[in-house]
Amino acid sequence: MRFHHLALFLHLTGVVLWVGGMVFIRVCLVSPTLTAAQWAEALAHFFSLSWVAIALIVITGGFMLIAVGYARAPLGWLLMTFLGTIMIVVFASLWFGPWMALREALAKGGLAQAQAQAQARAAIQRINKHLDIVLVLAILTAVAATLGLAL
């Protein structure tokens, strides 16, 4: 087994964990009975795994791209790198924007509880919109990674 095979396995494992987690959040956490606190708990676990997966994807993808050389890399790989970078930027904006807003809203209490719950629900809606964007980019990245090799 060459290093490339191990790097590819780890790269795909990271992709499955990250994208699979986003699909789970968008498809399985749609129950109106879930509270904002339950959403936040699920998202906290998701983010912990996601950042590890993203680091794995970036490190292994970088190693494979460097091993081949940018000049000799297939166009599909370069498109995958570009789209993956955009995915990470949008995902980071999700973390620093609506995720932080959700955590802040849940930390509020007392007389502002109703307002805090409304803010938490609004943050959850923004999180879902960000995840939708990242999932569309994930599909485009998968197209670049596979069909892009024919370019």
Image (cartoon, rainbow, N blue to C red):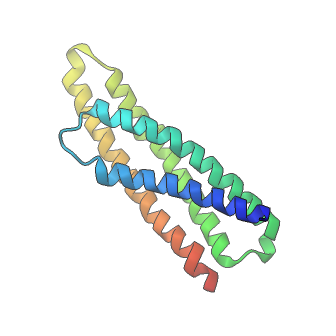
Count of numbered badges drawn on the protein: 0
Instruction: Find residue 56 and report its horizontal and vertical position in percent.
Output: 64, 50
Instruction: Find residue 51 and report its horizontal and vertical position in percent.
Output: 56, 43
Query: Quadrant where the C terminus lies?
Result: bottom right
Identify the residue shown where x is 37% and y is 52%.
24
Q: Is residue 151 visible?
A: no
Identify the residue shown where x is 21% and y is 45%.
31
Q: Is residue 13 above or below residue 145?
A: above
Q: Is residue 97 visible?
A: yes
Q: Is residue 45 above or below residue 149?
A: above
Identify the residue shown where x is 53% and y is 57%.
87
Q: Quadrant of residue 10?
A: bottom right
Identify the residue shown where x is 79% and y is 76%.
72
Q: Quadrant of residue 127?
A: top left
Query: Quadrant where the N terminus lies?
Result: bottom right
Query: Taking 138 as reference, is 104 left or right?
Result: left
Q: Is residue 10 above or below residue 147?
A: above
Query: Taking 53 as reference, is 65 left or right?
Result: right
Instruction: Find residue 60 and report its horizontal and vertical position in percent.
Output: 70, 56
Q: Nearer the viewer, residue 104 or 22?
A: 22
Q: Is residue 89 above or below residue 113?
A: below
The residue sitting at the front extreme is 1
The residue sitting at the bottom extreme is 150
